[in-house]
Amino acid sequence: MPEGGAATAFEPVLFKDIDTPELYRRQVYEAHEGYAALRRALGGEGSERMTPEAVLEEVRVSNLRGRGGAGFPTARKWQFLPPPDGGPRYLVCNADESEPGTFKDHEILRKNPHMLIEGMILAGYAMRATRGFIYLRGEFAQPKRVVDAAIREAYEAGYLGRDILGSGFDFDLSTYLGAGAYICGEETALLDSLEGKRGFPRLRPPFPAVAGLYGRPTVVNNVETLANVPAIVRRGGAWFASLGTERSGGTKIFSISGRVARPGNYEYPMGTPLRVLLYEAAGGPLPGRAFKAVIPGGGSAGLLVPSQFDLPMDFEPIAQAGSMLGSAGVIVMDDSTCMVRAATWLMEFYADESCGKCTPCREGTKWLEMALERIETGRGTPDDLELLQGLPGQILGNTFCGLGDAAVGFLMSAVRHFWPEFEAHVAEGRCPSGGDGR
Amino acid sequence: MIHLTVDGRAVEVPEGTLILDAAKEAGAEVPTFCYHHLMRPVAACRMCLVEVERRPKLEPACAVTVAEGMAVHTKSDRVLAARRGVLEFLLAQHPLDCPVCDKGGECDLQDNTMNHGRFRSRYEDPKIKKRKRVPLSDLVVLDEERCIVCQRCTRFMEEVVEDPQLALRQRGAYTAVSTFPGRPFDSLFSGNTIEMCPVGALTSRPYRFRARPWDNRTAESVCTHCPVGCNLAAQERDGSMVRVLSRENPDVDGGWLCDRGRFGYRWVHHPRRYLAPLGRERASRRETPLVWADALEQARAALKAAGPRTAVLGGGRLTAEGQMAARRLVEALGTELVDHRTGALRFATPPGPRARIADLDRADRILLLGVVPESDVPVLDLRIKAALRAGARLAVVGERRTLGERAAATALVPPRGLGAAVEALAEAVARPPAAAGAEGVEAVAQVVAEGERVVVLWSGEAGGAALARLVQALGERLVGTLVTGGAPSAQGAARAGLERGRAGEILAAAAQGDVEALVLLDDLFEDAPDPDLVRRALERVPFVLALAHLPTESAARADLVLPLAAPVEMSAHVVNLEGRVQPIAALLPPPGEARPDWEVLLDLAGAVADRDELVAAYRALPEPAFVAEEEEAPAPPPPGALVAVSGRIPFDSGVRWEEGLRTRLPRPYAAVHPDALARLGLRPGEAARLKGGGFEGEVEVRADDSLPVDSVFLPRGVIGLPAGRLHGLAVELEAVAAAAAAGEA
Amino acid sequence: MISEARRQKAMEIIRGFPQKSSAVIPLLHLWQDEEGYLSDDAIAEVAEIMGMPPAEVQEVVSFYSMFHRRPLGRYHIEVCRSLSCALMGGRDILDHLRRRLGVGLNEPTPDGLFSVGAVECLARCDLAPVGQVNLEYTDRLTPEGVDRLLADLRARAEGGGAGA
Ligand SMILES: Cc1cc2nc3c(=O)[nH]c(=O)nc-3n(C[C@H](O)[C@H](O)[C@H](O)COP(=O)(O)O)c2cc1C
Ligand code: SF4
Ligand code: FES
């Protein structure tokens, strides 16, 4: 390990048994402490049974923060729900996972669906929800079959349905398949989609906690967030908190892709330096290549350059460095990568996925896509360069939802760090970065 | 109250006020596109972004409400930059075809660009090709390239009309407004989308290329197509009326117009308008134009001779001034043969208190008695829907189902069954509440009886005495009743005392030769319960005088016709169903020698008065009193028979005078429940023979699941179909082919 | 006309939701799974069952990239064009496929056997470049690999097999 830090010793939470054959089957999961947390919380007799408040308290102590991208403290989100009024309350699992370079939820869904289901039952209990949905992106037809089978098994075992484990708690759960739209990962657009509409983000307030699905109190949480809950209940919030940093408890799955030797999902404690992920986990650059830039948090995040590789991978430090931890989809670019081209590809994505509701994102992403394409293919003009300097600022912060900011995050950072490369494309009509660039 | 500053100026506004409105209060104009004050904010266009101190991002002023101590900036550099940015983005894909765009001169995009934009767009790429000139219907045309995706039109159809026929298609930069392929935009309220569209994406087909807004002259008027009296702005150019816009009156129309009102204006330019008095010789039907002096002399002489044996029929379409003048004429003649209720209306005056339209907004229960709002008082349909969204509950008693599943309870009654049903309702409301799970009238009674603020809409066609008892049973909980039936200004006619007899009896007397002169203030045929009786009466009466605009069937049979000015051709007042007296202003001079109704009627009465006197006299009249009157119960129809029920439709034969609406001209049709249709072996769209009550004719068959299975709905006001006369009678309906075969056999 | 079997299935789907409106996307999936794409008639049928105006159903259909309004090839091959796959040559695979088949995007070959589409990140970036054939994932695509894939699929089609 030439450049990487020391191998890190820690206890994995999510991937502890991930490669156990047939872990997706209930008996196998149960043989690996599966549903132990649920039994502990709901199954115990009388005073041993945990109250919903007790479950919530463990999650609060655990410092679990949302793994969907924003890092919002999970327990606090649950606490926003108004007191029960006898009507339905919903827990929705965000399994949309459409952020470019992010593929961690897919692995959990495919290999360990019961961990998510158990987490959802516990979360549902803590917030007194009556019904859960797992919103899967349309492309997840295969994982959907696995999750559906697991849900059936959970019903058969009495973990779902009426009076779960004799606790008097009822909870129903089903999957829902989207149909191809990145914006449906945004939680309010997701709710619109789940209600059978186009996925337009909603005006807030009211927040979903007050008026979410069907206008009822609703919590939306990411797959990974919810999958952490069984371990937190089983081993205690304090244990979970101790795995991470002061502000972010637990471990995190980092999806590493792009130009590295060993792309894949790697579980590491929160706050692990980026360098450890790149070298220890992912095996460093491809043979004969050198790292050029890394996106630490999915396509929506600004890039980091090698001098920033010692940053701890946690929400605040990465934000302070001008990027974001986001979904922790780590996309790696090396000396063969043309930054203009990378920016063009990403802008194509956002122009394609802009929902069309608000002006700056709808029009701005399309315009930038066209300007970038011209520059990238050698047809750019100095006016186009001016657009790259100006238009992103007209989008950033002015759009209806976070997609607009996401769309310009990479471009703005690439302009900041690699401006000469953009200029050279216009001046020379070709890419100066060598490698296998066109 | 909340205290805040806008651009440094302190303002105080009520809690819940939008920043946008608070800014206006402080004299700061914040530009908008997607925001529309009659709909919920969506904050989509981002034009209205403003800076709020201590908030990291700019906030949409159209969607964020004020907070105590807030400091808002609407002109900071950040705000101006964002605003210019949004404009630049909107113009990027915009075709910039303002010189050929109908919206030029009244386009928010144009205006906002002038006031807030930069003038050189940096966009040089080819624009995304979208569809141009897409006819969504015969009234509305869409230009997708001009659309800025503000969603006002789609939100209007979804939020206000609750009939989302317009929707978005695609996403991102390709987003466009669309109907479903092959289905026209078919809504009675479609025209509102044209007016709401902030750019030239939705335009009016009748208005297209007729004028530029700055060339138009406007007069404030009131729609006289139905009793609501929506306020409108009528516009003309070069002496020709070109369009009608809404002139929002929150208490009356709530800012909306129906398509009948918006597009029903071309009749004033119909080539067959009467331009001069006309004498007609009965035998030869020869018509001779007359000078006014001669015509009036002839008329006065005939009426004087007939004196109290003169009948005066109609009057529900006159101005308030005209109604007062008609009252003078009636007094001068000393006749009691007077009635404005020439159609199905029986009671123009409600028992108990009158409601106001705005009472619907605060009602917790709305009771419809024989009223189908969309057909009878279209814009109130939207108001009722809004009230229901706000939590009111709807109960319906009628011969047709209306407002579908929005009704908490519906009692479908057989034709002519309204009176009995109201009677039963009055009884049920007076009783202690029935057990849950009640149906029909009992269910309606349950809904109504729980109300604290009940507003009743009543057709006025039947059940007067019963309603009086219901009013009593409701007591304080009744806010009031609106009578929706009759001609648009029936309430004015009633107040002016133009109901002294019964039109039906007067016509019967006329047909027997007991009437010597007949003054027609309306067409009697369009609404007549019995057109044959009208025909016989007109033939028998020695002198028939018609005041008319157009050669209606009645006017075409008169001995003397006096030409009237249309509402947009005079300054006067009209009365709506609340009894509200609303001014109308002249937009155009009357064509030829046509004159305002009140002038003509004063001349006939030999009276002298000016307009102000007439209005003052009208206002001084007492509210007419409700006259209870028992109605005879209808004979029960033979079991298993199909019984006709008649009702208004939004576009009746009146549109034959409307160039822009001619495609809406209805052919005679008969609608029955789909099950009944199947039983009769008929298919929708097929021709069938309708027989009954001495009538036989061909009609188109339609399916309508708002009807009871044993009713046949016949539209009123459709030439060639005596719907009013057949109402309540057993009829037969059979396929034309079958009838032909039977004939041959 | 909607077959009775499908209507039954639709009703079952509708019953599975607390509110009916949620069923529209599952129903569209059902129709598309059975018919390959969503015709005007299909949309009108779903609208009828849902009790929604067809314009609103079309709005939903046109918003989501996985709903197709025109028939595709019997084997619809999609390749991810997002950053992680593009960095590993995904876009070259896409071009290669289009050249091989001589078609534009989402346009079936004359024999109706194949069509090619571009999709955004499929969440399997560790196995880039990633694609899917009739929605079943396939990964680590190479030009030679997709040539073999085309040959296999063609053989399967000729052998009378169905599906991917
Ligand atoms: C444009 C956009 C896309 C998003 N996509 C996803 C996604 O694919 N998966 C996800 O879990 N959260 C996504 N989010 C974040 C969600 O809105 C939401 O914050 C998250 O599901 C909350 O779950 P958590 O609290 O467990 O993180 C997205 C947000 C935005 C603005
Ligand atoms: S930023 Fe605007 S257009 Fe983009 S996805 Fe969000 S709401 Fe839609
Ligand atoms: S007017 Fe406020 S966002 Fe459009």
Image (cartoon, coloured by chain):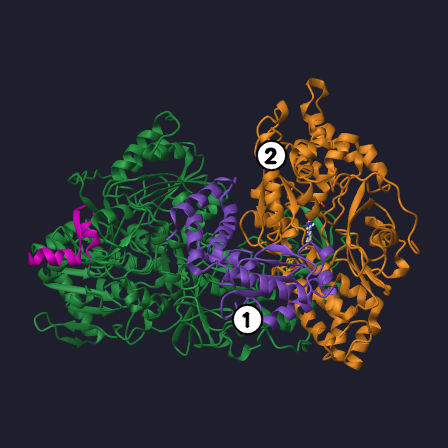
Find residue A153 and name its label: 2
Relative horizontal placement of residue A275, taking residue A137 as reference (left or right): right
Magenta segment, which residues?
B721-745
Can residue B724 be found in the magenta stretch?
yes
**Residue B722 place in picture, x, y as percent:** 19, 55
Pick the front one: C141 or B538: C141
Pick the front one: B426 or A373: A373
**Residue B162 place in picture, x, y as percent:** 46, 52
Give the residue displayed 71% in from the left and 36% down from the top: A79
Q: Quadrant of the C terminus of chain A?
A: bottom right
Question: Does residue B609 show up?
Answer: yes
Relative horizontal placement of residue B418, taking residue A204 as reference (left or right): left
**Residue A92 place in picture, x, y as percent:** 63, 42
Q: Chain of mark 1?
A: B
For badge 1, the amino acid type reads Arg
Can residue B560 be found in the magenta stretch?
no
Near mark 2 (Cα within 10 A), the count class, few <14, some 14-19 or many ≥20, is some
**Residue B154 place in picture, x, y as percent:** 51, 58
Q: Is mark 2 within 8 Å of ligand 1?
A: no
Q: Is residue B312 above or below residue B400?
A: below
Residue under circle 1? B146
- Element assignment for label 1: helix
Find residue B345 and name its label: none
Q: Chain C in the picture: what colour?
A: purple
For badge 2, the amino acid type reads Glu
- Element assignment for label 2: helix
